[in-house]
Image (spheres, rainbow, N blue to C red):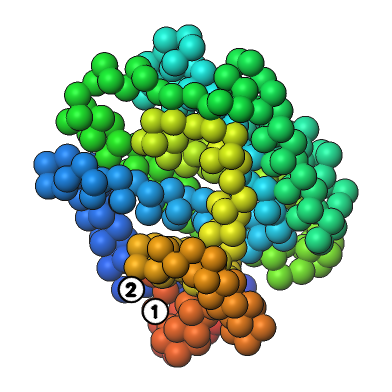
Amino acid sequence: MTMTAVPFADAGLPAVRVQRQTPSGRIALTLALAALVALVAMPWWASTGTIRWILELCCYLAVAQMWNLLAGYAGLVSVGQQAFMGAAGYALFVLAQTYGINPFLAVFLSLLVPAVLAVPTYFLLHRLEGPYFSIGTWVVAEVFRLVSTNLPLVNSGAGMSLRVMKDYSAFERNVAMSLLCATLLLVTLGGSYWLLRSRFGLALIAMRDNPVAAASQGVQVGRLRFLIYVAAAVGCGLAGAIYFMAQLRITPGSAFDPMWANLAIFIVMVGGIGSIEGVLIGTLIFFVADRWFGEYGASYFVVLGLMTLAVALYARTGIWGAIARRWDAPWFPIGRRLIDPQQGTKGETR
């Protein structure tokens, strides 16, 4: 538990301490580290099919958390993050298959593409508000899909196959995928947790609660939204590159599939917007539902849509919000509690 003494001697008040961690948070971090170790060790305990399932789950977590940062803190409701997933996926295939770069190195080199594309995209869309911004992000994703359909470099609408992966044994591919899964979660979930606990996290929380008031207190709202947008694009790009590497094939339809936006919205809205815990809960719900009921096709998607709508209308903080109201035991605490050694907790900022 990290605590910092804050003296109030000049005001004639007793010293208080700032508490940043909680017992539930320490338990969650321990479990998270154990999960990362299990991910890295997957080739020695899991089958290839199980590794593919876990990789897909990790990609869902990453994409949902990136959308959570955008909508839950920056106030940018995007339905087009698949644009950056597809861009990074295609960049990986071009670098590895066309130019002969090691595919595992190409995963990280491909992130330059969504990072570069996010800059003009944001400056094109940032003046739009609310639903207009959302529609704009969807239009951009469709433009990316149409460009890839007519671009000879990426084999146009026929798509590309990652044939270079046959040069690696099944065990080598499993080891690489396991390491990439762990890296993906460290970058997206771990990076988000680190960001929210930093001084930038305080600015994000202030911006989430009231952007006008935050700006009046010196928070550079426009700059912060831009940085979050680019970071989310890179995070989604990493998930896309890893996902399509595992699939060994990419096409315009799969690369820029709007379903990625749909699942991110479902996960965050049902689990709880503005919280990492909500993303974890929502992802597990979606993953299990997809495995058990995905065969029902359109009916299954209608049920998910109705569930998302019901949560948005009657439980806006999602499942985690209901849990947090009943039990004060955050898994990933980002707030600051002022502790008076004589009287206990004095207050809290989130």
Q: Name the residue rendered at 62%, 50% in the picture.
A: 258
- Near mark 1 (Cα within 10 A), the count class, few <14, some 14-19 or many ≥20, is some
Q: CA distance from mark 2 to mark 1?
A: 6 Å
For the residues labelled 2 and 1, say whether their Cβ atoms are less than 8 Å apart.
Answer: yes
Q: Please state which amino acid type lies under the numbered disc 2.
A: Ser
Res. 52 image quadrant: top left
* Placement of the N terminus among the 4 image quadrants: bottom left
Query: Between 21 and 39, which is closer to the camera in this rendering?
Result: 39
Q: Residue at x 82, y 45 (%)?
A: 125
Point out residue 302 in the picture as x, y percentages from the top left corner: 57, 72
| Image position, residue 123 (x, y; %) | 82, 38
Farthest residue in the top direction?
A: 99
Against 14, residue 155 (above or below) is above
**Amino acid at the residue labelled 1:** Ala
Other residues around mark 2 within 10 Å, as few (<14) / some (14–19) / many (≥20):
some
When the figure is inspected, residue 40 is found, relative to residue 171, above or below; the finding is: below
Query: Could you tell me which secondary element the residue under label 1 belongs to?
Result: loop
Measured as percent of width and height from the top left, residue 131 is found at 81, 61
Q: Residue at x 20, y 29 (%)?
A: 170
Q: Nearer the viewer, residue 308 or 26?
A: 308
Q: Residue at the right extreme?
A: 127
The residue where tag 1 is placed is 329
Kindly state the secondary structure of the residue where label 2 is placed.
helix
Question: Is 172 displayed left or right of 58 in the figure?
Answer: left
* Quarter containing the C terminus: bottom right
Q: Indicate which disc residue 343 carries.
A: none
The reply to whether residue 265 is visible in this rendering is yes
> What residue did someone put label 2 on?
24
Disc with the residue nearer the chain's start (2 vs 1): 2
From the viewer's perspective, is residue 325 above or below residue 210?
below
* Number of numbered labels in the structure image: 2
Q: Is residue 302 above or below residue 178?
A: below
